[in-house]
Amino acid sequence: MTDSPTADETTPAATDSPTGTATGDGHGHSHGNETEGENGSSTNGTDGANGKLTVVVAGNEVPLQEQSQSEGSSFYIDEDDPHTWHGSTSGQTLAEALSTLGIDAGPQELSYDGETYTESTEGTGIYVRVNGEEVDPTQYELSDGDEIWVTVETADMDVETPGEYIKADQQHIHGPITFEVEGEELDFSEDRYQTNHQLFHFEGGHAEPWHAHSWSMTLEWAMNSLDGINVTENSVTYDGTTYDGSDSDTTVTIEVNGESVDPSEYYLKDGDNVNIVVETE
């Protein structure tokens, strides 16, 4: 179910302030997965790597700590942080790591808790992303600092939008954006977008990336939380003017990663490149 942001929801955004030495994620954002030793090298929970991991299957977040093997295993979840993973095996693939949590992931299918999901099923999407990039879990080898999102969406999943708030110091999602109206690109570094809703905002004086603090937020909800903007499947309203794509002289493009989407149905994922363009004759 999708709800529009209300006035009492527009709490100023909390700034993401990861602690410790960080590894870049390609979004101009940092990962707070490591601390520095006396010699400046990173120190992790094991002699290998660590990072962040969230798995959401059919609208339900997988309780990774409950699925995890014990500390010191080849891959396990930190007992103090349900989203921090530790890996001690060099060359370990993401699929091998996930299998220790009872999750079998392939290039186009995923099995968990007795259910198998395949991308060939209508309405089902499987997204495996590391640091915002789509990967084949059977081929990708884990690296220190990796932020991993595994998401399975189904046609009949029932989730609330915008979803539960993810704290600023926890793993959340980011991506680039272009919003252009009649040849002019909107500058999201403006103050009114920097102090937006705590669930969706821009920060640090930067026009990108966007920050979403929920894994069940639609593109429509995110954009409609911004001051002066309203987006539907075929229209864009900006600063009081509505541009309707059904008008013969107006073209409205709403894309994510180069593909047209219905913003009321598309859930944002880490690394998504959002492109919203309005053209008039």
Image (cartoon, grey):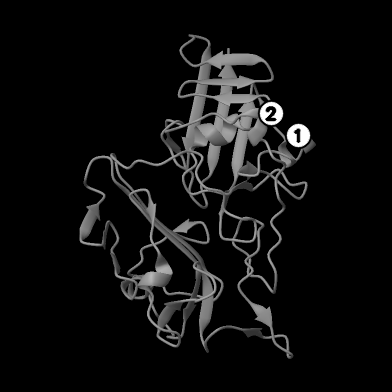
The image shows residue 262, relative to residue 89, as above or below, that is: above
Q: Which mark is residue 192?
A: 1
* Quarter location, residue 207: top right
Which element carries disc 1, helix, strand or loop?
helix
- Residue at the (63%, 35%) spot, across then down: 9
Q: Which mark is residue 227?
A: 2
Location of residue 175 in the rendering, given as x and y in whole percent from the top left corner? 57, 48
Which element carries disc 2, helix, strand or loop?
loop
Nearer the N terminus, badge 1 or badge 2? 1
Q: Amino acid at mark 1?
A: Arg
Observer-nearest residue: 51 or 169?
Answer: 169
Location of residue 110 in the rendering, given as x and y in whole percent from the top left corner? 27, 59
Location of residue 194 in the rendering, given as x and y in whole percent from the top left corner? 74, 41
- Residue at the (65%, 63%) spot, across then down: 30
Looking at this rendering, what residue extends furthest in the front direction? Answer: 8
Location of residue 62 in the rendering, given as x and y in whole percent from the top left corner? 38, 61
The image shows residue 66, relative to residue 25, as above or below, that is: below
* Quarter location, residue 24: bottom right
- Residue at the (68%, 24%) spot, across then down: 228
Tell me how many marks there are. Answer: 2
Q: Quadrant of the N terminus?
A: top left
- The reply to whether dot 1 and dot 2 touch (C-beta < 8 Å) is yes
Q: Amino acid at mark 2?
A: Asp
The image shows residue 12, relative to residue 114, as above or below, that is: above
